[in-house]
Image: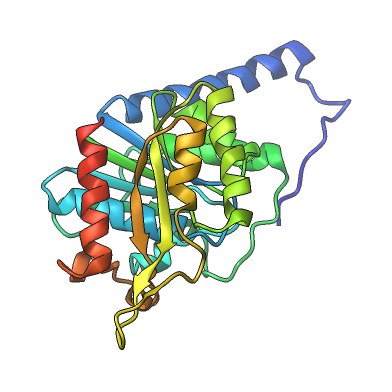
């Protein structure tokens, strides 16, 4: 539980010195973020207009694919209320800290390091009940407090929507590019258009749109099944003037892999899902 302490009228601190201390604290947090991020070549923020479209699984598999291609990669989950990366990546326990009080990411293979909001909580079912300003400050401090060192890519799994949390991420990671995730059905596409306009409003470059849970061939008869309609992602990308990176088919193995704590990109090298996902990664790399 967080208790907010109100200013004490009997405090020996003048209003001017209090304001100065607060500004110094904010400046320090911003400086830490800039120092940490300056050693990272590309920052990709994976976003969605709504929850439930597979944003976190796309972020995790993207990070794993980049790491397997030899890129030094970091994966960061800054979703305060629903962190999923820790579960998908099989993270256990709390993060350690270095001698200079920086968080040490957990390794996943040779080229991938992972941090998650979940790794700051005593147990995974503990809720975070905070107001907007507290969440924004926490996200900014979290981004600036990780000892990444030199990276080719940092993949940031941002909270869904267009509110305080994704805005804080974008303002903190100023040179990041957005990868927006949707599913093909209209209810998701209506929200993803808001995310696209959100990025345009805050002058954030959009790398492209990924359609998740697309049509897949039936394993029994081979007929193409479209559980969430089809083609909506590509049409929306065209209408909104952004790049369509590709569509990945619905695959129950993705769900199984996430629940086991091992992303499908780490255990599978072929099949419809990985074939489509590899094509998306190659297109993204080509257009960076």
Please give the name of the residue rendered at 31% of the width and 40% of the height, measured from the top-left corner: 154
From this viewpoint, is residue 148 visible? no
Which sits in the foreground, 275 or 285?
275
Say which of 245 and 42 sits in front: 245
- Residue 287 coordinates in the image, percent (x, y): 25, 31
Q: List the single residue furthest toward the bottom.
A: 220
Quarter of the view holding residue 258: bottom left
**Where 129 falls versus 287 (above or below)?**
below
What residue is drawn where x is 34% and y is 59%? 248
Q: Image quadrant of residue 56?
A: bottom left
In this rendering, would 215 be left or right of 275?
right
In the image, taking residue 269 as reference, residue 246 lies left or right, namely right
Q: State left or right for residue 156 relative to residue 188.
A: left
Which of 271 and 148 lies nearest the eye of the viewer?
A: 271
> Residue 96: where, in percent of width, then height?
35, 54
- The C terminus, quarter of image: top left
Which residue: 55% across, 62% down?
52
Image point (62%, 47%), residue name: 191
């Amino acid at each position: 539980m967080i208790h907010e302490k109100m200013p004490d009228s009997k405090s020996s601190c003048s209003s001017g010195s209090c304001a100065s201390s607060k500004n110094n604290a904010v400046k320090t947090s911003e400086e830490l973020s800039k120092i940490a991020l300056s050693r990272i070549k590309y920052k990709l923020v994976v976003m969605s207009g709504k929850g439930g479209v597979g944003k976190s699984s796309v972020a995790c598999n993207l990070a794993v694919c980049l790491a397997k291609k030899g890129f030094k990669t970091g994966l960061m989950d800054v979703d305060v209320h629903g962190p999923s990366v820790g579960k998908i990546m099989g993270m256990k326990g709390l993060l350690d800290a270095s001698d200079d009080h920086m968080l040490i990411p957990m390794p996943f293979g040779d080229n991938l390091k992972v941090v998650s909001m979940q790794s700051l909580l005593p147990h995974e079912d503990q809720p975070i009940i905070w107001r907007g300003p507290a969440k924004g400050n926490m996200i900014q401090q979290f981004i600036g407090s990780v000892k990444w060192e030199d990276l080719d890519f940092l993949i940031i799994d941002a909270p869904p929507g267009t509110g305080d949390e994704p805005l804080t991420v974008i303002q903190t990671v100023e040179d990041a590019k957005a990868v927006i995730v949707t599913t093909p059905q209209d209810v998701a596409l209506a929200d993803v258009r808001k995310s696209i306009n959100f990025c345009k409003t805050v002058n954030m470059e959009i790398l492209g749109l990924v359609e998740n849970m697309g049509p897949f061939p039936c394993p029994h008869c081979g007929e193409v099944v479209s559980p969430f309609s089809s083609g909506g992602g590509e049409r929306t990308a065209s209408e909104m003037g952004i790049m369509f990176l590709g569509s990945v088919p619905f695959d129950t193995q993705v769900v199984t892999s996430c629940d086991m704590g091992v992303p499908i990109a780490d255990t599978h090298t072929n099949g419809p899902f990985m074939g489509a996902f590899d094509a998306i990664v190659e297109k993204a790399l080509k257009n960076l």
